[in-house]
Amino acid sequence: ARRPIFEDRRDLRCFLSCLAWGVHRGRIEVQSYSLLTTHLHLLLLSSVGELPAVMQRILNRYVRHFNRRY
């Protein structure tokens, strides 16, 4: 639908905080990222092989924030 997933800097910071959660838990390593208004690009490594589960938790955390806010 080409709708924004990041409305402002607060949303960007929240997403980065969610991403940092996965990094601090030792589940993923961020190689590169690009956050745009309508989508994002991530290049991640997971040494424990849990990338789908970690991404699900990260995105669920962000979506809850976004839905509460808007």
Image (cartoon, rainbow, N blue to C red):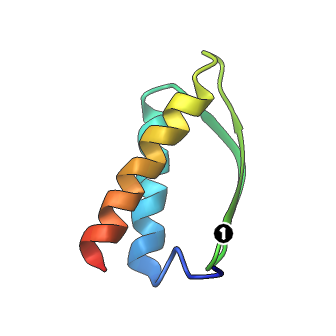
| Residue at (43, 39) in percent of width and height | 57
Quadrant of residue 51 in the image?
top right
Query: Could you tell me residue 62's position as x and y percent?
Result: 40, 58
Q: Quadrant of the C terminus?
A: bottom left
Measured as percent of width and height from the top left, residue 24 is found at 44, 34
Q: Residue at x 70, y 39 (%)?
A: 44
In the image, residue 14 above or below residue 11: above
Asked whether, in this view, residue 53 is left or right of residue 60, the answer is: right
- The amino acid type, in three-letter code, at marker 1 is His
Residue at x 46%, y 60% (from the top left corner): 15
Tag 1: Cα neighbours inside 10 Å, few (<14), some, or many (≥20)? few
> In the picture shown, does residue 47 fall above or below 2?
above
Q: Is residue 45 left or right of residue 28?
A: right
Q: Residue 22, position in %: x, y?
A: 47, 37
The residue sitting at the left extreme is 68
Which residue carries the number 1 mark?
39
Residue in the picture at 47% in, 50% down: 59
Q: Residue furthest top?
A: 48
Identify the secondary structure beneath mark 1.
loop
Q: Can you say whether 69 is above or below 58 in the image?
A: below
How far across and down, in percent of the image, does residue 29 sit? 63, 34
